[in-house]
Image (spheres, rainbow, N blue to C red):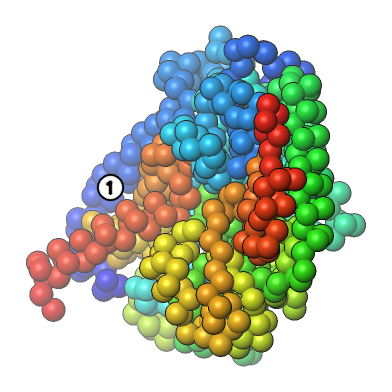
Amino acid sequence: MMKPVILLAALLLLAPQVSAQTFPQTTGRIVSVGGAVTEIVAKLGLGDRLVAVDSTSLHPPEMRALPQVGYMRALSAEGVAALHPDLVLLSDNAGPPAAIEQMRGLGIPLKLIPDRPTPDGVADKIRAVGAALGRQGEAETMSRETTDRLAAVSRVVEKAAGRPRVLFLMGLGGGAPVAAGRNTAADAMIRLAGGINAIDGYDGYKPASGEAILDAAPDVLLLPTEAVDAAGGRDAVLALPQFAGTPAASSGRLVVMDTLYLLGFGPRLPDAVADLARSLHPELAQDLANDAAPRPGGLL
Amino acid sequence: MTSLPMPNSAWKGRSRHAGILTLLSLLSVVAVIASLGVGASAISPGTVLRTLLHTADASPRDAAIVLHLRLPRTLLGFGLGAALAVSGAVMQGLFRNPLADPGLIGVSAGGAMAAVAVIVLGVPALLAGTVGLLALPLAAFAGSLCTTLAIQRIASDDGRTDVSTLLLAGIAINAIAGAVTGFLIFGSDDRQLRDITFWSMGSLGGATWTTVLGLAPFALGAVFAAGRWAGVLDALLLGEREAGLLGFDVEPAKRRIVIATAAAVGAGVAAAGVIGFVGLVVPHLVRLMAGAGHRLLLPASALLGGTLMLCADMLARTVVIPAELPIGLVTALLGGPFFLWLLIRQRRSFPP
């Protein structure tokens, strides 16, 4: 075996391999990491260039057939290198940091995409992906349309008579269900759709006791599709003892949505907000359909 | 399991020892070569060899994968496997308990507590610039050492370490460290929680030359120091008093054993997270084939530990290409059933 000094010297020589390559416009192989990032790539019409995605990239459905680089926080540098990508789009939530450093060291062209769960964050995300792929024009249009449609939805939502208290639960399996507190993507969605997060006592996702749920007095329960399916359907969920005595259980108001659609903060955000708003404010359904529908002929 | 060295092992003698060690050394070499040749990227064995011997005509990318990813990863894996297995063997000897592993003296729990604290609470801005990515391993190493030193302190009186107090204090401190970790997890967000989960299942994926050079002194130190303790560990199998009567200076040996183990396993936890089962199972595998004498057990455990760790890692990084399994899953999933099979087979042939 060689001396470590020689090896280190060899590595230093290899380091400058990281060059400013430009993305080949028509042939480039893309690896996309992050559910929203992948959605944007697909929406820009470059889905057929994707050679692999991470396990959070579930939409559009054909993405699920692509090779998987694993969960976005548990990437493998050699795994990604083996795909010979011309560009790796990484949500800036991706990790672990060591693997990203290793990818840089191998000279894999990386683009970090800012990934924040806010309406402005979606516009930034779309622009950043567009810039990385050389599709600035389309991305600009898409991000402006997204912002405009969100504004239209917000204008309708402002007309709502009241603000229902909404409780978002991650899942129902065993013990205390995990509920969304402040500063979560779920909290942001509830606000955008004209509701109030029924939990305002803590940040993040944490288990909530039966009493805390009763105390939160939710008018509406909001759950991911998988959680409701696993619990045996809507009626079974509404009959659960944890919810007995809440306004939501007595009036049977349970809203079920796909997790990535609801919390992904991708290009489908205006639709997701409009859908949730329609469930929270049935009286606004007509206005939402008239004012906040996608414009025919638009990109979205 | 920890039965005394067989009386007949003396006449079987050195040639048998040499045979077993030669076999294990050969296996180690094969594992190292295979580990350098296997991975998500298809790189021919010839290219790997030429890159290593520096007659490189390989593409810079392939060379970087071999020198930058696979070589440090292989060295880290072998060193870590050897350190964990030797530490396990030493702990089992020290505690005279077949279930002992380095986790017993708080190394893993303390390291995990510190690592989770860094993941959840972050690094103070003042330090972040200087330590950067090394914050987590450094904290884990410090957490491992401090926890073990605390346990050692509690169990010592007048320079005498009581092994059963060491064990009980270890259980209590492990529980406390686990509870603090739980508190931190409760305060974590979704992403931190995922990071914690993956970290606690272990991975050699973060191996760099820095981590290899960081682990090396502690792993090598423990492995070579352990060689010098073979005599006292053999004597300890008879009992502490008996070991003292045989002329061994038992107290300082116990202290050094605990500290060296904590340093080696702590450095391992820092470099690769918590990788269970290697420290527990490998010494038992060696005892099944070579008996309980430490003169053979310790070096054989080091070689077999390194070999098995590399095998587990090769599986971890190839079964779900281009993703990667946490190596702790592989060691437990393969090691557990295999160990059970050995146990059952042994009970059948030697009914109690």
Q: Amino acid at mark 1?
A: Ile
User: Which element is circle 1 on?
Assistant: helix
Q: Is residue B193 left or right of residue A145?
A: left
Q: Quadrant of residue A94?
A: top right
Residue A219 drawn above or below residue B310 = below
Residue B191 visible from this viewpoint: no
Q: Is residue B348 left or right of residue B100?
A: left
Q: Quadrant of residue B348?
A: bottom left
Residue at the outermost top position = B57
Residue at the outermost right position = B126
Q: Nearer the viewer, residue A182 or B99?
A: A182
Quadrant location of the C terminus of chain B in the rendered image: bottom left
Parent chain of label 1 = B
Residue B130, x across and y down, in percent: 85, 49
Residue A267 visible from this viewpoint: yes
Residue bearing mark 1: B20
Residue A98, x across and y down, in percent: 66, 43
Q: Is residue B214 left or right of residue B309?
A: right
How many C-alpha atoms fall within 10 Å of the one at disc 1: few (<14), some, or many (≥20)?
A: some
Quadrant location of the N terminus of chain B in the rendered image: bottom left
Q: Nearer the viewer, residue B241 or A234?
A: A234
Q: Count every numbered label the image shows and give the total.
A: 1
Residue A190, x across and y down, in percent: 71, 62
Q: Quadrant of residue B174?
A: bottom right
Residue A67 drawn above or below residue A211 = above
Identity of the residue drawn at 46% across and 65% down = A228
Q: Nearer the viewer, residue A168 or A280?
A: A280
Residue B334 drawn above or below residue B37 = below
Identity of the residue drawn at 56% across and 87% down = A245
Residue B53, x across and y down, in percent: 53, 18
Identity of the residue drawn at 31% across and 61% down = B336
